[in-house]
Amino acid sequence: MWLYLVALMGLHYLLRWYREKQVVSHLQDKYVFITGCDSGFGNLLARQLDMRGLRVLAACLTEKGAEQLRNKTSGRLETVVLNVTSTESIAAATQWVKERVGDRGLWGLVNNAGIYKPMAYFEWQTFDDCMKLLNVNLLGLVQVTLSMLPLVRRAKGRIVNVSSVMGRIAICGGPYSTSKFGVEAFSDTLRRELQGFGVKVSIVTPGSFKTEITNLKSSLETLTQTWEESPMHIKESYGQQFFDCYYKMVKKGLSMCSSDLHLVTDCMEHALTSAHPRTRYLAGWDAYFIYIPLSFLPTSLADCILARYNPKPAEAI
C-alpha cells in the first residue's frame, strides 16, 4: 500500500517537473513591466530577464535608480519613473507602456514595489504610517494592475504579485501583514476572474531576504524613532524593557535574512516564462519550514507558540 502511494507521489512530481520545464515560445518578442526596480528583487529580475532576451520595461521610483539600472543592462531595457501611490503617475506609465507594446499587448506585469517600515506594533504607529504602507503595498498594486489589465488581457499574459510570508501568517509588523493579506486576496480573486481570458496570475511568497526594505540600519532607526514618538501612555503600557527586547528580536531577525535574492527572482522568472506557471511560489528556507507550516496550524496553537517568543508588556495581566 505505502509503496503504491510513494510511487504515485513520485509520478506526480515527475509529471509536474516535466510540465514546468516547458517554456513559452518567442520570449524575445514579449514585454514585461516590473515595478520597484530601483533595488532588490525588481532590480535583479529586470537584469535577469534582460539577459534572457525579454523586452523589459522597468519602473523605478527615482531617475537615479533608473539610470543606474540602464547602465547595467542592454539597450533593450527601458525605464520609466513611477510612483505607485499617484494616480497621475500610474496613468502616465500605462500610456508609456501602451506606446511600446502596441497591438501585441503586455505579456507580463510584475507588481514588486513595496515598503516595510516601521516594523512596529500598531499602537506605536500613526494612522498616516499605516496608510502610507497600505497605499504602496496594496492599493498601489491594485491600481497599477487595473490600469495595465487591458494590455495584459490582450496578450493573454501573466500577472505576478509579490506577497510575503506575513501575508500567510500575521506575526509582527502591523500594517505590513495587513497589506500582504490583501495582496493574497486580490490575487486569488483576480486569478479566478481572469481565468476565462487566458490570463494567469501567480503569487510569489518570499521569506526573509536582505533588500532595501529590510536594511538593518535604517529599519532599526525607524523603529526607534517610531517608539520615541509614541504617546507617553502607550510607552508606559508597554514599558522600555518591552521595547528593548522587541528591538533585539527585530535586529536578530533582520541579521538572519538571506542574501540569495535569486531564490525569489527565479520564481518570478518561471512564472513569466514557463508554459505552465504555478499559482503560488515559496522562496526561502524560513518560508518552507517555519512560516507556512505555522500558518496551517490551528490558530490557538499558533498563538501559543508565538507567545512564547514575545516579550511581556509592563502592564500585562
Image (cartoon, rainbow, N blue to C red):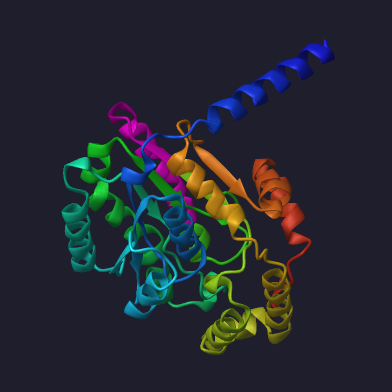
Image height of 191 relative to 159, above or below: above
* Residue lying at 29% horizontally and 35% vertically, measured from the top left: 156
Please tell me whether residue 165 belongs to the stretch shown in magenta: no
Please tell me whether residue 188 belongs to the stretch shown in magenta: yes
Q: Position of residue 45 (x, y in %)?
A: 47, 58
Q: Is residue 155 visible?
A: yes
**Towards the viewer: 5 or 46:** 46
User: How many marks are shown on the rendered structure?
Assistant: 0
| SS majority, magenta | helix
* Residue lying at 41% horizontally and 71% vertically, measured from the top left: 69
In the image: residue 15, left or right of residue 111: right
Give the position of the C terminus as an image quadrant.
Answer: bottom right
Image height of 311 relative to 272, above or below: below
* Residue lying at 49% horizontally and 36% vertically, measured from the top left: 279
Q: Position of residue 129 (x, y in %)?
A: 43, 75
Magenta residues (range) = 180-201
Q: Position of residue 138 (x, y in %)?
A: 39, 58
In the image: residue 153, left or right of residue 99: right
